[in-house]
Amino acid sequence: MATLTERIRLQAIPVAVVLAAFIVLWYVGAVALNAQGAIERVLDPQGPWTWRDLISATLSMQRPVVPTPGQVLKELWSSIMDWPIDTPRNLLFHAKVTASTTLVGFVMGSVLGIVLATAIVHSRTLDRALLPWIVASQTVPVLALAPIVLVVLGSLGMEGLMPKAVIAMYLCFFPVTVAMVQGLRSPQKIESELMYTYAATRLQAFWILRLPASLPFLFPALRVAIAAGLVGAIVAELPTGAQAGLGARLLTGSYYGNTVQIWAALVMASLLGLVLTAAVALLERLVLSSRRRP
C-alpha cells in the first residue's frame, strides 16, 4: 500500500500541472489583451520598440485590462500586510464581513433545507405541493432577486447582515433539500420493515435509521451549499452599496477602473471559498469517522 506521503504526492502532481498551465495561459492572455493599451499609453506608437519592450510594457501597466498573477499577488500582499486588519483597506477585513454573512446564510439555509426535506419525506401531500416550487425557485436569477429581497426586508426594518444572509440562504437551501430528500429515502425496504417490526415510532425511525443514512448525502450538499452561499453573500453586497465585504471591494474597484483591485478581491473570494469548503469537509470527516467507531 502507498504511504500517506506518496498518496499526497500523487494527488498534488496533477493539481500542480493544472495550476502551472493556468498561470501560463493567464500570462499569455494578459500580454495579448494588454498589448493595444501598452502601445497607446506606454510605448510610442510611431517609435521603434521590440517585442520584448511590448511584453515588458504589458506586464507593468498601472491599469491593465487583465492584470498578471504577479500584480494580483502584489496587491494581495500589500492590502493584507500594509494596513491594519480592522480597516477597510485590508482585504481580510472585507473577507471577514463576507464570511460572516455566508456562515449565517449557510446555517439558515441548511436548517431550512433539512426541515423541508423531512416534511417532504414524511408527507406525500407536501412532496407534491412543495418540491415543484422548490425546484422552480432556483430558476429565478439571484442577481435579479437580490435587490427585491433587500428592499422588502429593508422596509420591514431588517438592515445590516441579515438581509444579505437571506440571499445566501436562498442559494444554500436548495442543494441541502434535494440531497436530504434522497438521503432520507435511501434506507432499503427491509430496514424500514425491521423498524416497523420493533414497533418504532416515526420519530425513532427518523433518528435511528433515516438521519444516519442521509449523512453521506448531506455533507456533499453542504459543501456545494456553502460555496453557493458565498456567491449569494457577494451578490447581495452589490446592490446595497455596502462599505464592507468583498462585493463592496469589487464595486469600488469597478467604479475607479482599478482592475488589479478587482482581481485581488476575486482571488480572495476564491481563497475564502476554499477555506469554507475545507471546513465543511473536515466536519464531514469528523462526523463520519465517529460513526464508524465501534
Image (spheres, grey):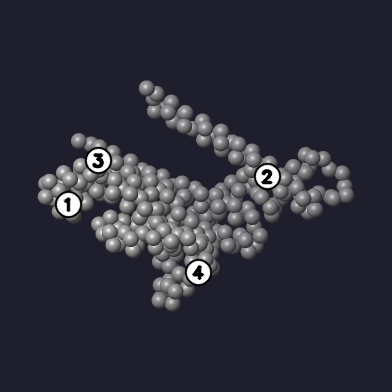
Which residue is labeled 4 in the image?
Answer: 147
Residue 66 visible from this viewpoint: yes
Which residue is labeled 3 in the image?
Answer: 291
For the residues marked 1 and 2, what is the alpha-carbon distance in whole angstroms?
59 Å
Q: What kind of element bears circle 2? A: helix
Mark 3 Cα within 10 Å, few/some/many (few <14, many 20+)? few
For the residues marked 4 and 2, what is the alpha-carbon distance in whole angstroms?
34 Å
Earlier residue among tags 2 and 3:
2
Q: Of discs 4 and 2, which sits in the foreground?
A: 4
- The residue lying at 35 percent from left, 55 percent from top is 177
- Pointer 1 with pointer 4, Cβ within 8 A: no
Mark 4 Cα within 10 Å, few/some/many (few <14, many 20+)? some
* Residue 108 location, quadrant: bottom left
Q: Amino acid at mark 4?
A: Pro
Residue 82 visible from this viewpoint: no
For the residues marked 2 and 3, what is the alpha-carbon distance in whole angstroms?
49 Å
- Please give left or right for residue 77 compared with residue 218 in the image: right
Which numbered tag is attached to residue 29?
Answer: 2
Q: Which of these two is toward me, 73 or 157?
A: 157
Q: Amino acid at mark 2?
A: Gly
